[in-house]
Image (cartoon, grey):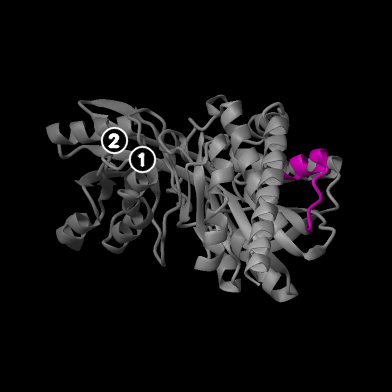
Amino acid sequence: MRFSLLIGVFLVLINSLLAQTQDELVIKEIFDNVLESQVAYENLRILCDKAPGRLLGTEEAAWAVDFMKAYFEELGADTVFLQAFSTPAWIHHSSRVSMMAEGEEIELSADALGPSPSTPTNGLKAHVIEVQGLEELKELGEDAVMGKLVFFNRAVDLKHVNTFRVYTSAIDQRYHGPRVAAELGAVGALIRSVGTRVDDYPHTGSTGFKEKRIPCAALSTIAANQLSEALKKNQSIEVSMFIDSEDLEKITTYNLIADLKGYEKPDEYLVVGGHIDAWFNSPGAHDDGVGCVQSADVMRIFKELQLKNKRSIRIIMFMDEELFQSGGNAYADYCEANGIVNYCALEADAGGFTPEGFSIDAPDSIFQILQSYHELLEPYNIRYIKKGGSGVDIYPLKKLGVPLMGYRTDSQRYMDVHHSAYDTFDKIHIRELQLGSGNMAALIYLIDEHGF
């Protein structure tokens, strides 16, 4: 009896070692393929060149969807379709900010925040109140703020090592600042860009209005410093702001979905995706064109290597992560209404930099399985598989019980480019991009092969 038990344990160990060896061979094959491929890199070059500023509702956004749709069809995806949904939209036409200092009009590099309303046709001009945050503004009160232009100038906290934490250290000013200023009677708001560089590239983003909206814009960090220094010399400086924008009550737009059918469980979907939209001021290379082409590359890898996927691999180019997050919610609603089973979901929206790891939002039993793959992926720059957030677009799937994963990269350069004109194709390093595609494909292979 004891001998039979030992034989059983021995056979289990042998099978485990054989499976691991097979996994190592497949993963090496994936990286041999991906590190010699330039397909994703070329797709990203075209997206950035032909469809910069592809914000929801723009011609550029529609072009980007059509381009990637044609790519999936040429690749030989089993199903390619547009998932339609309705949402409000906001279109930016132009924005400009200047100050009068020492008798001279000085242009300040700025971009409107979304969804800022337009100024009057001739713009607006007002005296400025500089504050370091929401609480200081509230303490000033309505009498001090009424009719003024509020300038939020608290810098990000650079002491954080992870630049997403640097970002969150000042994001409250951008998201809540214009709303609070509006409630206190301000006529407009300016926000110091939430970025890690001192440069002349304004970083835009969304802001959370309620009932009352006022024109608002982000100043580059250099422009913010200019305005702050001018105010120290003369607190009566006036700033002029001009914003031309358009609110669309409802449009029809689309998530792009491409499927590679599984041979064993075709109705279980392994979702991989990024968001196809980008801010009006940006080519959107790192945010998030790279996540889209990496996700698409997962399907290319499976196709070229003829890896037989048991479950269907579903690649999604989500629309509207940046402004209203309507695409991710629309996909979750679509799945709930149609009984679609998403086995897991992986999002790439952390830039195309050197791989660091995967963050997991899933029950402990599934997390432990995913964490066990770290040893297999470590040779390919994966430093960790740990608990954490996943991504904005796939997060609505959590209510359906879907295990969620986020692909993570070295963040040090991400907030240099985020939501700005500095986020250009030349900031992409092909090997960093391809390592990301490879690691995403490898993780999807392991999940499909071994299950949860």
Of the pair 259 and 126, the residue shown nearer to us: 259
Q: Tell me if 205 is positioned left or right of 192 in this view.
A: right
Q: Tell me if 246 is positioned left or right of 12 in this view.
A: left
Question: Is 353 rendered above or below residue 397?
Answer: above
Of the pair 91 and 148, the residue shown nearer to us: 91
**Location of residue 333 in the rendering, given as x and y in whole percent from the top left corner:** 65, 70
**Location of residue 26 in the rendering, given as x and y in whole percent from the top left corner:** 72, 41
Q: Tell me if 150 is positioned left or right of 209 in this view.
A: left
Which circle marks residue 360 in the picture? none
Q: Residue 451 occupies which quadrant of the picture?
A: bottom right
Query: Does the stretch in magenta take in 79?
Result: no
**Callout 1 secondary element:** loop
Q: Residue 156 occupies which quadrant of the picture?
A: top left
| Contact flag, marks 2 and 1 (Cβ < 8 Å) | yes
Q: Main secondary structure of the magenta part?
A: helix
**Front: mark 2 or 1:** 1
Q: Residue at x 27, y 43 (%)?
A: 157
Which circle marks residue 224 in the picture? 2
Which circle marks residue 193 in the picture? 1
Q: Residue at x 40, y 50 (%)?
A: 215
Location of the N terminus (image quadrant): bottom right
Query: Does the stretch in magenta take in 307?
Result: yes
**Location of residue 22 in the rendering, given as x and y in whole percent from the top left corner:** 72, 45
Q: Amino acid at mark 1?
A: Ser
Question: Is 220 rendered above or below residue 334?
Answer: above
**Location of residue 127 in the rendering, given as x and y in whole percent from the top left corner:** 23, 44
Q: Residue at x 38, y 55 (%)?
A: 175
Residue 416 appearing in the image? yes
Q: Residue at x 69, y 63 (%)?
A: 85
**Callout 2 secondary element:** helix
Residues in magenta?
298-310
